[in-house]
Image (tube, helix red, strand yellow):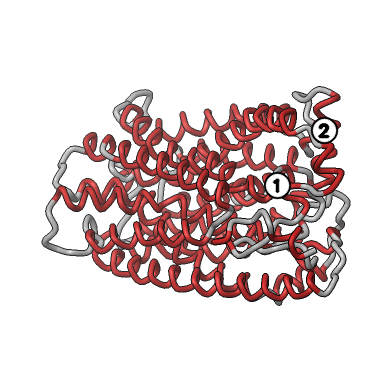
């Protein structure tokens, strides 16, 4: 029994494969892997492309305030002191509160309705931002924007866990998160063009918000038509393909059981799991990096000595391109090896090196621009891998939904704090912010090590239970002795 659980797992992972990852016995033998791979490619093409577009636009509509601030945005709204920083941060006040709520409600309201409504709401708010007149109106719109967009990122991750096996999460999440890197490059190019427009009584930053909001609005009907509540119901799959996927989902029941109903006991069980708290605090440090760079990169690059707004916006494009390429490679390797933590540590180390270079006052312009690339290499990989790692190690559905939602709640609190750490008066070098980011990166590296230890100890206990003859019971979720944690 013990050999069956552990024989196919990479030695470095120190974990075993449960049946939902590869199947077992006659079920495994009867599986048509070639047909399954073909259908997975079809699912990827339809789902991942749609989710990527949603992620791209939601991330862009939330973070484009950084590009707006390079134009007459602050002057037009009469922002003084650190009001710009407050406007950056306030969106996360509601964003973090609603993330675990939408995660739980995804299964209740259905993915099709929840994600369509979210897309419509944030699109309308983005368009509305073009017409705000002062700080109070800006804050009101961004508070509502946070509540609307909070449904997208956590619910996409949950949908992935409802559709794919555990050793397929990272690369799919990578594909989707890569769109946020693309949104940085796309946003810089779009801002470069749109902020040059001054017509019909609207300034450049207003045109930027207006056009980006309209693009997002056009996504809503596509989501409603194309997104199935379960992939086995997808209109773009044939009856035979639906049957094969239904069989695959049944084999994956240990990770996701479609028949599971909400129970408060699952929430309490999650709250008793120490891995939740370790990864949540670690995610705060990780997201400090994400929001610092994505929001303030235009200003940081402008501080390299480029007086032209155009140059500052365009120079963000290659940084995001490198981030996207690195992210794709790391996600693929993580799934290939079934390892999360070693890649997470490596990416955190890359961010740390970049922040150290940026924090040195006498650093040359070339070295500082190189440092931005070093931070960008770990920028999205750290965020994604920490969440994927949590999704792999929490089951069933509502425990996983609450765990990943809470981790993102704590992590995204960094967004609420970042505007007060990277203060306007410390631009463009943001030395205080860089020192804070160094500390947070070190903290996340240490906590990743702690979580690795918890995983190894947990798997040792499961090995003992399996050796004693514990029965494989997929409906127990991660309490199943045959459910091995991913390292």
* Residue 393, above or below 446: above
Q: Position of residue 372 (x, y in %)?
A: 28, 50
Q: Quadrant of the N terminus?
A: bottom right
* Residue 292, above or below 276: above
* Residue 330, above or below 433: above
Neighbor class of circle 1 (other Cα within 10 Å; few <14, some 14-19, many 20+) is many
Give the numbered dot on residue 244: 2
Is residue 450 shown left or right of residue 390?
Answer: left
Neighbor class of circle 2 (other Cα within 10 Å; few <14, some 14-19, many 20+) is some
Whether residue 124 is visible here, answered yes or no, is no
The residue under the point 53% across, 52% down is 384
| Relative depth, front residue between 96 and 253 | 253
Q: Position of residue 80 (x, y in %)?
A: 30, 57
Q: Quadrant of residue 87?
A: bottom left
The residue under the point 47% across, 50% down is 137
Is residue 14 shown left or right of residue 318?
Answer: right
Give the numbered dot on residue 78: none
| Relative depth, front residue between 20 and 11 | 11
Q: Quadrant of the C terminus?
A: bottom right
Whether residue 213 is visible here, answered yes or no, is yes
């Amino acid at each position: 029994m013990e050999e069956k659980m552990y024989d196919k797992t990479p030695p470095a992972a120190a974990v075993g494969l449960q049946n939902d990852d590869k199947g077992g016995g006659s079920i495994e033998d009867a599986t048509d892997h070639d047909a399954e791979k073909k259908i997975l490619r079809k699912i990827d093409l339809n789902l991942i492309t749609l989710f990527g577009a949603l992620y791209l636009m939601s991330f862009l509509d939330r973070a484009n305030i950084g590009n707006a601030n390079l134009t007459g945005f602050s002057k037009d709204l009469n922002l003084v002191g650190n009001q710009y920083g407050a406007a950056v941060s306030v969106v996360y006040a509601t964003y973090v509160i609603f993330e675990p709520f939408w995660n739980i409600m995804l299964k209740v309201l259905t993915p099709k309705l929840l994600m369509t409504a979210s897309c419509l709401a944030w699109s309308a708010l983005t368009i509305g931002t073009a017409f705000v007149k002062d700080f109070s109106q800006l804050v009101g719109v961004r508070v509502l924007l946070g509540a609307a967009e909070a449904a997208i990122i956590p619910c996409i991750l949950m949908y992935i866990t409802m559709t794919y096996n555990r050793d397929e999460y990272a690369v799919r999440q990578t594909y989707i998160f890569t769109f946020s890197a693309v949104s940085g490059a796309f946003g810089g190019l779009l801002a470069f063009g749109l902020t040059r427009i001054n017509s019909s009584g609207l300034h450049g930053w207003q045109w930027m918000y207006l056009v980006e909001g309209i693009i997002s609005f056009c996504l809503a009907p596509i989501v409603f038509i194309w997104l199935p509540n379960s992939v086995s119901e997808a209109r773009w799959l044939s009856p035979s393909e639906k049957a094969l996927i239904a069989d695959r989902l049944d084999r994956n029941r240990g990770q996701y059981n479609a028949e599971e109903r909400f129970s408060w006991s699952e929430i309490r069980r999650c709250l008793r799991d120490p891995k939740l708290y370790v990864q949540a605090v670690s995610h705060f440090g990780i997201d400090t990096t994400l929001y610092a760079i994505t929001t303030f990169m235009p200003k940081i690059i402008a501080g390299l000595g480029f007086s032209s707004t155009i140059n500052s916006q365009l120079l963000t494009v290659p940084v995001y391109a490198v981030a996207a390429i690195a992210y794709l490679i790391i996600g693929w390797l993580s799934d290939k090896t079934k390892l999360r933590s070693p890649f997470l540590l490596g990416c955190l180390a890359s961010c740390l090196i970049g922040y150290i270079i940026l924090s040195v006052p006498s650093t040359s312009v070339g070295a500082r621009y190189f440092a931005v690339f070093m931070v960008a290499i770990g920028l999205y990989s750290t965020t994604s891998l920490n969440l994927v790692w949590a999704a792999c190690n929490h089951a069933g559905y509502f425990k996983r939904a609450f765990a990943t939602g809470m981790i993102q709640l704590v992590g995204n609190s960094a967004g609420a704090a970042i505007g007060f750490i990277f203060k306007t008066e410390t631009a463009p070098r943001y030395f205080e912010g860089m020192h804070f980011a160094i500390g947070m990166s070190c903290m996340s590296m240490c906590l990743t090590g702690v979580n690795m230890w918890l995983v190894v100890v947990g798997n040792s206990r499961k090995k003992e239970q399996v050796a004693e003859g514990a029965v494989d019971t997929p409906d127990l979720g991660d309490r199943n002795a045959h459910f091995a944690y991913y390292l």
